Amino acid sequence: MMLAEKYLRDAMMPHMWCPGCGHGIILQAVIRAIDKAGLEHDKTVIVSGIGCSSRASGYMNFDTLHTTHGRALPFASGIKMANPDLNVIVLTGDGDALAIGGNHFIHACRRNIDITTVIFNNSIYGMTSGQYSPMTPVGQFATTSPYGNIDRNFDVCELAKSAGATYVARSTAYHAPSMPDLIVKAINNKGFSVVEAVGQCPTYYGRRNKLGSPVDMLNWQKEHAVNVAAAAHLTPEQLADKLIIGELHNSSAPEFTEKYDQLVARLQGRE
Amino acid sequence: MGRKFAVAINPKWCKKCGICAAFCPRQVFTHKAGHVPEITAEEKCIGCNQCEQRCPDFAVTVRGKNDESDS
């Protein structure tokens, strides 16, 4: 991939992800989006938490911050508050963003702070060998759900929308060719943007749930994804096991750092 | 037709998953399990770039032979 020379840290490659892991596909889509959006290296900061997906920041040739578990968004919020001119992109996983960092996630949505968050959803904690996460579907197997998961999983896109995020989209690793355009729109949105990127963990999730090879898992994404326009014509029953992909929510609301600047200006008597 | 493409795999980064070969619509690659896929029919490549964009390892590059574009 030619863009790899421009955007990846060559000395860190090859990456540590397993053969066929969806994270590399999603990271490539992020890089293509950054290139398409024309973001400057010196004006872009990549922040991640902990987990397989959060290793992504270490491979990216930008100013990057690999933070503590679940806390990517608080660090990212601090960066954005200190210098609102920066493009701040958070790369996080389903467990990092929604279990350990779940509270930070909903409040970042609520604040509508101008950060783009890409959630690498592989439905499992891969790094620690396959515990269920809040995104593991009901009935699926993990090391901590040997008889099948009884918890209902979050729909992170609905959660983000309800909590106040102003741009929400979903894609899959199979849909890598169209994923960058959604991330570009997320980057360009002046507010909190969430892109759920559904990927595959062939090693821990796939093997335990007998989902076959990485190719089989990508084909599963292909077969279970329904574009948001087509989904409007389907019943809830027909959509029960489907992933609705595309732009799911796009609205405008006051952005947090701008409101903060206005508050400071008002209190200093500058307006 | 007419436009030709050069397909390359970086063997240092490839983890031999075979995703490129599986999703190629023109069978440009030959993949044996446990091996880096071989590019055995480059002349059939239509430049759709699906192999490159779905490669988890940033290992596949498709270029137009007459230009420098990454497409």
Image (cartoon, coloured by chain):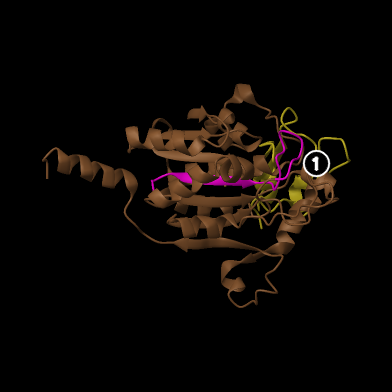
Work out whether B38 lies above or below A254. above
Amino acid type shown at disc 1: Thr
> Residue at the location (61% across, 73% down)?
A230
The picture's colour for chain A is brown
Q: Residue furthest top?
A: A11
The picture's colour for chain B is yellow
**Left or right: where A79 falls relative to A62:** left
Which percent across, then down, holds residue A1? 62, 38
Which percent across, then down, holds residue A132? 72, 45
Q: Which residue is mark 1?
A: A143
What span is in magenta? A112-132
Q: Quadrant of residue A78?
A: top left
**Left or right: where A64 falls relative to A135:** left
Which percent across, then down, holds residue B12? 73, 27
> Residue at the location (37% across, 37% down)?
A80
Q: Is residue A131 magenta?
A: yes
Query: What's the magenta bit mostly, secondary-structure-wise?
Result: loop
> Residue at the location (42% across, 42% down)?
A38
Q: Quadrant of residue A44?
A: top left
**Left or right: where A79 falls relative to A31:** left
Q: Nearer the viewer, residue A56 or A265?
A: A265
Q: Quadrant of residue B57?
A: top right
Work out whether A150 lies above or below A4. below
Write down the chain letter for disc 1.
A
Helix, strand or loop at mark 1: loop
Q: Nearer the viewer, residue A163 or B41?
A: A163
Q: Is residue B35 magenta?
A: no
How would you rate the neighbour count of disc 1 (Cα within 10 Å): few for under 14, some for 14-19, many for 20 or more? some
Quadrant occupied by the C terminus of chain A: top left
